[in-house]
Amino acid sequence: MSTLESILKETRSFPPSDEFRRKATVSGMEAYNTLCEEADDHYLSFWGDLAREMISWKKPFSRVFDDSNAPFFKWFDDGVLNVSHNCIDRHLPLNANKIALIFEADGGEVTRLTYAELYHRVCQFANGLKSLGIQKGDRVVIYMPMVVEAIVAMQACARIGAIHSVVFGGFSAGAVRDRIQDAGAVAVITANEGLRGGKTVPLKATVDEALALEGCDSVKNVIVYQRTNGGAHWVEGRDIWWHKLTEGQSEHCEPEWMNAEDPLFILYTSGSTGKPKGIQHSSAGYLLGAANSFRWVFDYKPNDVFWCTADVGWITGHSYVCYGPLANGATQVIFEGVPTYPDASRFWSMIEKHKVTTFYTAPTAIRSLIKLGADLPKQYDLSSLRLLGTVGEPINPEAWMWYYEVVGGGRCPIVDTWWQTETGSAMIAPLPGAVATKPGSCTLPLPGVIADIVDESGAPVEPGRGGFLVIKKPFPSLVRTIWGDADRFKKTYFPEEFNGQYYLAGDSANRDENGYFWIMGRIDDVLNVSGHRLGTMEIESALVANPLVAEAAVVGKPHDVKGEAVVAFVVLKGNRPEGDDAKKIATELKNWVAHEIGKIAQPDDIRFGENLPKTRSGKIMRRLLRSIAKGEEISQDVSTLENPHILSQLQQGV
Ligand code: PRX
């Protein structure tokens, strides 16, 4: 409720300037409303027309939508296309020499790649994959640093119809193993090492560690891009260097023609159980969502220099690095490093250097850069910028205002884009030449997105009241299923409570009197740490896997840079530790979680108790744990608590 009240006090509103509006693809509210009405009145032909306009089809579709097996919806399903062909080949007749990628390495070296060069690189690598026997439908795990080759690898998979599953380079061996196993991957594409912030990241060693674990027998080959001079342990017959694989391969590769509904990729994301969900996206519907939202939300112009700072390990790096911008023939910046290396002006100096027009990043990055140097942007010429964006979590109005004034010079609209791994593309976000923005609100749904906020019975709630964010009609870029778990897909996203009709996003939200959406947070046991989704159960399972730990409960607490931080309440098998002992074990457990899942999941705070607060029926009272984590006085009713004395133990920090 406190979040709800505070955001409702935000009354500032920023309409686009006349100049911005005049030049915009969707110009003015009338144009936006017309599109929304078109979508409302003729939903299927609205999407069908967009699919014909935005996608090059090898064979056109004759049917827009099929809901005969709801909620396993199909879009454009007798159409034939290839996503990589749409992202690269179709730009060659007119734009072969246009720059596709401006790559800036961790150390500052810059490489530019034209669409023709990208085409040749993708084709050679695709031919290399084929030479290993990899074919349509095979799953390939990509565990790469943020380099050009990561995009080449994804595009090459799309080209030959292999289903990629990118695993973020910060995940540990255990997480890599789980994903390989669940997807049944036949190959892993990695680099010997990555480079981030002047340090090397041992990617190949982590893959080796993962493959040495049980259950990875499906992997026949590991393809290793040589990013540094560091050596790599080698398994003969399994491992092959990227440069050897592509040597002598043809620079042309006929795309594998795919059905619209053939899976393009799987991307794992956290849910409320310990097991990550393999979010499976389609070829055509996903591409349409990524391409069209890129055009609308980022008001794409052919001369733009777009920069999305997301890693390809996340959905944002799929839709707004690898697919959306390329499908539009855009020029974009790819950055290997981190925003704070060599210092906290890296983003600003890169915007100046590459004359970036459109900059898209996460609130957590903005907050950390404010902390490290709120005046730094003023030392750079940021006048090339015309549009800013954020994604991943709600942005607090203070950070929004700083972004708007200091980075954007008060001239650039900010598109706060709400969406998810599951939705594949931006769902609620201002079309910047039309919709006035409000700091902290993702504003209004894109035309064709029928979003609403409902109560437990599925009835819409009054303005200002919180409720469940739902999308009431299926849309092309929606997740098709959870890989290997159709039942979980149905239960999670199209629950019985809403008659299986609405897509349940898993967020709570409210709408103000202008219909603007304000996202309040997750309704499930999912945390949002630095814009990354982490399941509390996943971290709990990792903790309990430690031989010292008997029981663990994980909650989030507000954090001024990360948004949310992980707090773990732990019961050890032996006695409750105190003093230096407690400190030592807490450090050990933090490192353990980093090793089991990845550094992003590491708890900031570990508290030890002889037990956890439970109801008489044995349920952990998470509500209470959340209050303790925040350092709040316990005002809740504790009469149902079996063991009230342990509250004081858990209130003590280590
Ligand atoms: O809680 C919402 C939050 O991030 C969740 C989706 O996480 P993920 O699948 O990892 O994708 C992140 C990048 C698209 C959502 O359920 N979220 C995402 N964008 C916003 C947001 N919360 C508030 N405002 C946003 N703009």
Image (tube, rainbow, N blue to C red):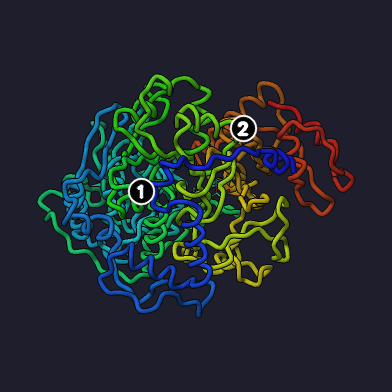
The tag on residue 577 is none
* 57 and 157: which is toward the camera: 57
Residue drawn at 62 percent across, 30 percent down: 586
Name the residue beneath numbered marker 1: 300
Identify which residue is drawn at 69% across, 32% down.
607
C-alpha gap between disc 2 and disc 1: 34 Å
Looking at the rendering, which quadrant does residue 85 occupy? bottom left
Label 2: how many Cα within 10 Å (few below 14, some 14–19, many 20+)? some
Q: Residue 528, relative to residue 323: is it above or below?
A: above
Indicate the position of residue 158 as horizontal and vertical percent values. 30, 59
- State the residue at coordinates (30%, 51%): 326
**Residue 277 in sight:** yes
Say what amino acid the circle numbered 1 marks: Tyr
**Residue 642 place in picture, x, y as percent:** 85, 46
Q: Nearer the viewer, residue 458 or 198?
A: 458
Residue 366 location (% of width, % of height): 50, 32
**Circle nearer the viewer, 2 or 1:** 1
Q: Secondary structure at mark 2?
A: strand
Q: What secondary structure is marked by label 1?
A: loop
**Figure quadrant of the N terminus:** top right
- Is 282 situated left or right of 3 in this image? left
**Which residue is pictured at 70% across the width and 29% down the height?**
577
Q: Amino acid at mark 2?
A: His
Residue toward you, 185 or 85: 85
Q: Which residue is mark 2?
A: 559
Q: Quadrant of residue 280?
A: bottom left
Farthest-out residue, right = 639
User: Would residue 431 appear left or right of 538 to someone viewing this image?
Assistant: left
Question: What is the x, y in percent for residue 525?
Answer: 64, 50
Image quadrant holding the C terminus, namely: top right
